[in-house]
Image (cartoon, rainbow, N blue to C red):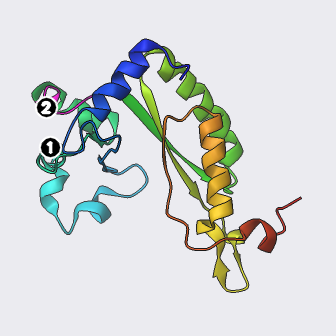
Amino acid sequence: SDRNLPTLNNMRRLLMQGRLANTGYVSILPVDQGVEHTAGASFAPNPLYFDPENIVKLAIEGGCNAVVSTFGVLGSVARKYAHKIPFAIGIGATIYFGSPESRRQLVEIAKIFGQAHELGMFTILWCYLRNPAFKKFGKDYHVAADLTGQANHLGVSIEADIIKQKLPENNGGFSALNYSK
């Protein structure tokens, strides 16, 4: 890898934490506290998790390598839990490929990921396809292997260290949607 030593050390910290330590696998608890999904929609069934401390406790008790949430949520409990689970060692972002904003998101996130690496932080990218045009002939290609694979490729090309992708359910999206040219 061409990542600097602080970034590699933080990746190592991630990989050496939790029940999957030293296996090469990671289990990260991602909790959106109202950025994309409202906290009410996310936590109404389990109001205990309106409290950020309970989210971090869940990640620790579940043996996760890390927990991902907003800076404010994690910052509110960092002093209490930073010695039990890694804090502030990486950043994450989401790109909705196919959305009208995806080109802008690619440029902005690439720049932010470069800055994160300079600061020694690893990067996580949620590579999701979102566009009603991905539906054709009654089939939804937003989970097509060829299209999600291309999204993953673009994520790696902007230096995402970890990519989160929905598992493919079909294939042939490029051909069906006439994107192959």
Quadrant (top left/top right/bottom left/bottom right) for the C terminus: bottom right
* In the image, farthest residue toward the right: 181
Mark 2: which amino acid?
Answer: Lys
In front of the other: 119 or 75: 119
What residue sits 22% from the left and 35% below the top? 17
Q: Position of residue 2 (x, y in %)?
A: 56, 19
| Disc assigned to residue 169 | none
Q: Position of residue 163 (x, y in %)?
A: 50, 45
Q: Quadrant of residue 15?
A: top left
Residue that numbered label 2 is attached to: 84
Task: Confirm whether the magenta stretch covers residue 178.
Answer: no
Total residue callouts: 2
In front of the other: 88 or 101: 88
User: Mark 1 vs mark 2: which is more N-terminal?
Assistant: 1
What residue sits 19% from the left and 45% below the top? 19
Residue that numbered label 1 is attached to: 60
Label 1, label 2: how far apart the Cα atoms are: 7 Å
Q: Quadrant of residue 21?
A: top left
Residue 108 visible here: yes
What residue sits 51% from the left and 19% below the top? 3
Q: Quadrant of residue 8?
A: top left
Main SS, magenta residues? loop
- Near mark 2 (Cα within 10 A), the count class, few <14, some 14-19 or many ≥20, is some
Q: Is the C-beta separation of discs 1 and 2 under 8 Å?
A: yes
Residue range in magenta is 81-87
Q: Position of residue 9 (x, y in %)?
A: 35, 19
**Going by the image, does 100 lie left or right of 47?**
right
Task: Confirm whether the magenta stretch covers residue 82.
Answer: yes
Mark 1: which amino acid?
Answer: Ile
